[in-house]
Image (cartoon, grey):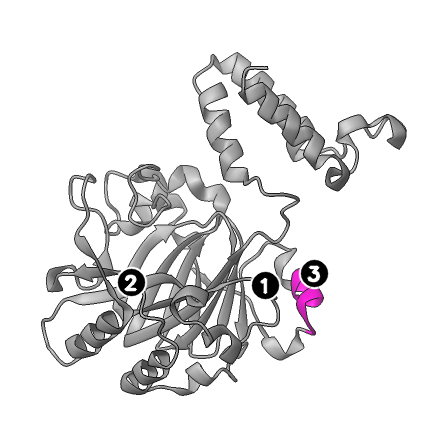
Amino acid sequence: MRAVAEIAASTIAGPDAFLRTVVAPCQPLVLRGLVGDWPVVSLADPAALRAYLGRFDAGGQVEAFFGAPRITGRYYYADDLKGFNFQRRSMPLAAALDTMLAHLAQPGAETMYVGSMPVNTCLPGFAADNPMPLLPGTEARLWLGHASTVSYHYDTADNLACVAAGRRRFTLYAPDLIDSLYVGPIDNTMAGQPVSLAASAPRDDARYPKFAAVRDQAMVAELQPGDALYLPKLWWHQVEATAPFNALVNYWWDAFAAGPDAPYTTMLLAMIAIAERPTPERQAWKALFDHYVFRQHGHPLAHLPPERHGILGPLRENYGKIRARVMHLLRGG
């Protein structure tokens, strides 16, 4: 296990430098002190943070996760993988915050957190008071709660996670280790994405023998208030909020999207079209994917002059043409 690389946030000159030096390498990176000047970061006391958030509260409903004391803040599946070991409750944000603070003073009380709260809707004005100039136009989301552990999962978008209060520990595995992580169901999840059953299980669980060979390839990022972590798409991560009360602001965006279509959608379509065909046919389609999509040997029509590339010319000029062809084919054309 090794630490995630880090840099001082003051060395990032602006959005272009952030995209070029932090995002483009597609490697996790800790940005020390990135949001240290945010007003919310200066509020170490939970009651003060509650009062600050109350200034922006639009009175909306949020989804709160509640865990019984026996789960010790580890939100996960039930033993049968059908249900979960926690409850979801919809409630006003003000009531959720008041309940969080009340439970802090009650030994043996339920733990709880509110996750992925869109601040523009729930807390209008918060983003302007705590700006993120590296990602203009990207909406912030707020996570609040007690000490907790969110099991290993991946995001299909790039993620900039900023600690506003408490402490966060991220433990990461690279995307190419997926075969050794024993991934759970993709359509019965705790919060949208599947989890690694092996990385979330007790050490040396006999059900997951391949995981033993990759366990020590984990990377760890320890974050204090004001620090941030850039997390590329598809990196597996466990998130531990380790203080009694914690707040995190994150930003999800697709840094290199050429249009509205997500790679994950392509994967699902490929599953129903290819996954259960005979092995030789799958290998043949893999060769085409490698050639046209992953382009390990460069542009597939590099042997032709650019004016003969057709819809394989510059993607920004041909995106609409390719998309129209795909939609026509999906309609049975």
Mark 3 vs mark 1: which is more N-terminal? 3
Disc 1 vs disc 2: which is toward the camera?
2
Mark 3 → mark 1, Cα distance in angstroms: 18 Å
Q: Residue at x 59, y 54 (%)?
A: 26
Q: Is residue 58 or residue 186 the one in the foreground? A: 58
Residue linked to disc 2: 61
Q: Quadrant of residue 292?
A: top right
Mark 2 vs mark 3: which is more N-terminal? 3
Q: Residue at x 61, y 66 (%)?
A: 136
Q: Quadrant of residue 63?
A: bottom left
Mark 1 → mark 2, Cα distance in angstroms: 24 Å
Per the rendered image, the range of residues in magenta is 13-21
Residue type for callout 1:
Gly
- Disc sitting over residue 137 in the figure: 1
Under tag 1, what secondary structure? loop
Q: Main secondary structure of the magenta part?
A: helix
Mark 2 → mark 3, Cα distance in angstroms: 38 Å
Residue linked to disc 3: 20
Residue type for callout 3:
Arg
The spot of residue 110 in percent (x, y) is 14, 67
